[in-house]
Image (tube, helix red, strand yellow):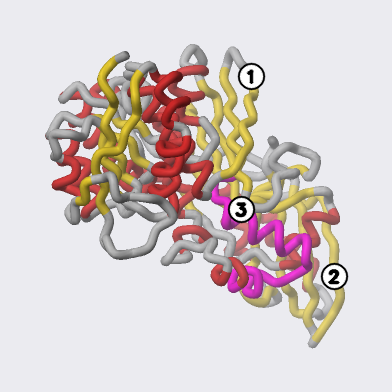
Amino acid sequence: MAAPLRLGLAGLGTVGIGVVQIVQKHAAMLAARAGREIVITAVSARDQTRNRAADLSGYAWEADPVALAQRDDVDVFIEVMGGHDGPAKAATEAAIAAGKDVVTANKALLAHHGHALALSAEAAGRVIRFEAAVAGGIPVIKALTEGLAANRMNRVMGVMNGTCNYILTRMEDAGLPYAQVFEEARQLGYLEADPNLDVGGIDAGHKLALLAAIAFGCQVSFDAVELEGIGAISIDDIRHAADMDYRIKLLGVARMTGRGLEQRMTPCLVPMGSPLGQLSGGTNMVVLEGDSVGQIVLRGAGAGMGPTASAVMGDVMDIARGVRVPVFGIAAADLAVPVAAAVAAASAWYVRMTLIDKPGALAKVAAALGEAGVSIDRMRQYGHSDAQARVLIVTHKATRDDVNDALARLAATAVVLGAPVALRIEEV
């Protein structure tokens, strides 16, 4: 049997302890499957005195993750600390410089610095594996870089933030307003320390940018992702969507067009009977569409100790077996610089607004839409209160630019109260 593969683990939170538990519980199985022992030699975290759900007494301790990354008895540096700068970045760079392979669950780090890190790793003959950074336990990175490597990818899309999916599902199932479910999610510990990373679409946008880079052979371009969170979604929107056999999801979509790379992470309506429409709770789903394979749907736990640690260890096992794949599927030096393209494809739209309830208001709305080139497919009015009326419109296919023009014209009518909500109806 080959020499043991020695791991240095930086970060002993939920995911890090999950990795420790797998290595300790399944030592014999891992060795049999990898053809060599998998052992942890040293660990690092901010607080050595904290009580953790694993026996760490057999491992060397490093207060500084950079020192851990440079140890002679570490072959693979595992980074599960989080953060796109600071210790995570410094330690990852140190590991590469010291000739270590890297496994990380840090989507923010790679979304901001992935290309530079990939160039450094590949120049040093090292690999960076990051299955755990996207969709938790779902093996989507491996699917793209290996299983679907013979396909030209047409589209990548999915629900990639379990917290947002939990909030939207809970609002629908319990009939609760957004603010109440948001607070519930916070108390349950589902939200990041900065909740906007979740509900603002940033966390999911990081993941989409990584998938797009692999799928379309280009450098990561997170800054070009169109981001819109779920904070404007009301319980009425969810009910109205359900009336039309749709559900609202924070949906990421990326595709390469003749104009450039489109990337968006926005709330959309999807058909209730589609795989995405049936997704509930904190589960993630990624849909991959290739020219030869057609559509592949991957569904599973998008976060949590077990699923994320499983993904980390899947990468470790590949390294132990000698599997060496470029970080983003193509040598980093050959990755194209993507041209960012705004989404130009036309679609139907859901538009919800509140009108001053007076004669001629609806006529002004219809005229404003028509002047922008947006035609009405369906219109419904929901009740009256305080001389106001809530109106729902579903349009025929229109571009985002036309819808934006229509919204600007609606604001100038003096009959629309507040900002309308406009959501794309996605064909999935």
Between disc 1 and disc 3, whose residue precedes?
3
How far separated are the C-alphas under marks 1 and 3? 25 Å
Q: Earlier in the sequence, mark 3 or mark 2?
A: 3
Quarter-wise, where is residue 172 in the image? bottom right
Q: Which residue is mark 1?
A: 294
Side (left or right) of 402 relative to 258: right
Q: From the viewer's side, name the closer residue of 117 and 228.
A: 117
Residue beneath disc 3? 267
**Between residues 191 and 342, which one lies in front from this camera angle?**
191
The reply to whether the C-beta atoms of the residues labelled 3 and 2 are less than 8 Å apart is no
Does 310 appear in magenta?
A: no
Bounds of the magenta segment: 159-183
Residue 317 location, quadrant: top left
Residue located 69% across and 35% down the image: 428
**Figure quadrant of the N terminus:** top left
Task: Give the residue type at disc 3.
Answer: Pro
Give percent across and percent down for residue 265.
Answer: 52, 48
The residue sitting at 58% across, 28% down in the picture is 288
Q: Nearer the viewer, residue 209 or 72?
A: 72
Q: Is residue 204 left or right of residue 77?
A: right
Disc 1 is placed on an element classified as strand
Q: Residues within 10 Å of mark 1 (few under 14, many from 20)?
A: few
Coordinates of residue 89 in the picture (x, y in percent): 23, 47
Quadrant for residue 330, please give it: top left
Is the magenta region chiefly helix, strand or loop?
A: helix
Mark 3–mark 2 distance (CA, rounded to whole Å): 22 Å
The tag on residue 382 is 2
Q: Is residue 94 left or right of residue 331?
A: left
Amino acid type at mark 2: Tyr
**Element under label 3?**
strand
Q: CA distance from mark 2 to mark 1?
A: 41 Å
